[in-house]
Amino acid sequence: MAAEGNPDPEPSDQGLEAELVSLRSQAEVLRQELKTCKDELQKLQKQLSQSERLQKTTESYNEDLRQQ
């Protein structure tokens, strides 16, 4: 029996190889997801920056109107 000390490591090696392939696949999926998240974050930060500039411009314009 293999469980009684037979040095036949193939079944466990195959299991480890399958697990390694699965982990590599998961890692690639996570890398792609991270890239997507970074791209989305960059886009949202740009939108936020534009919104903040617009808000400051609007506040300045409103202040000018109040002073007239």
Image (tube, rainbow, N blue to C red):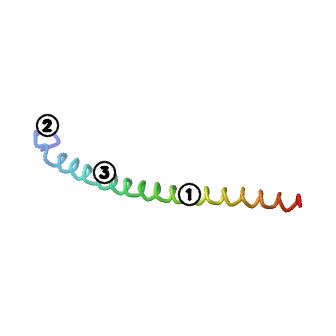
Alpha carbon distance from label 3 to label 1: 34 Å
- Decide: marks 2, 3 in contact (CB < 8 A)? no
**In the drawing, what numbered circle is on residue 23?**
3
Alpha carbon distance from label 2 to label 1: 62 Å
Badge 2 amino acid: Gly
Which SS class for mark 1? helix
The percent coordinates of residue 16 (x first, y second) are: 22, 47
Q: Nearer the viewer, residue 25 or 19?
A: 25
Q: Residue at x 81, y 61 (%)?
A: 62
* Residue where numbered disc 1 is placed: 46
Q: Nearer the viewer, residue 43 or 4?
A: 43
* Residue where numbered disc 2 is placed: 5
Please identify the residue farthest to the top as the structure is shown: 5
Badge 3 amino acid: Leu
Which numbered mark, 2 or 3, is in the foreground of this view? Answer: 3
Compared to residue 2, the image places residue 63 above or below, namely below
Please identify the residue farthest to the left as the structure is shown: 7
Alpha carbon distance from label 2 to label 3: 29 Å
Q: Residue at x 23, y 53 (%)?
A: 18
* Mark 2 neighbour class, 10 Å CA radius: few under 14, some 14 to 19, many 20 or more: few
Which numbered mark, 2 or 1, is in the foreground of this view? Answer: 1
Please give left or right for residue 33 compared with residue 50 in the image: left
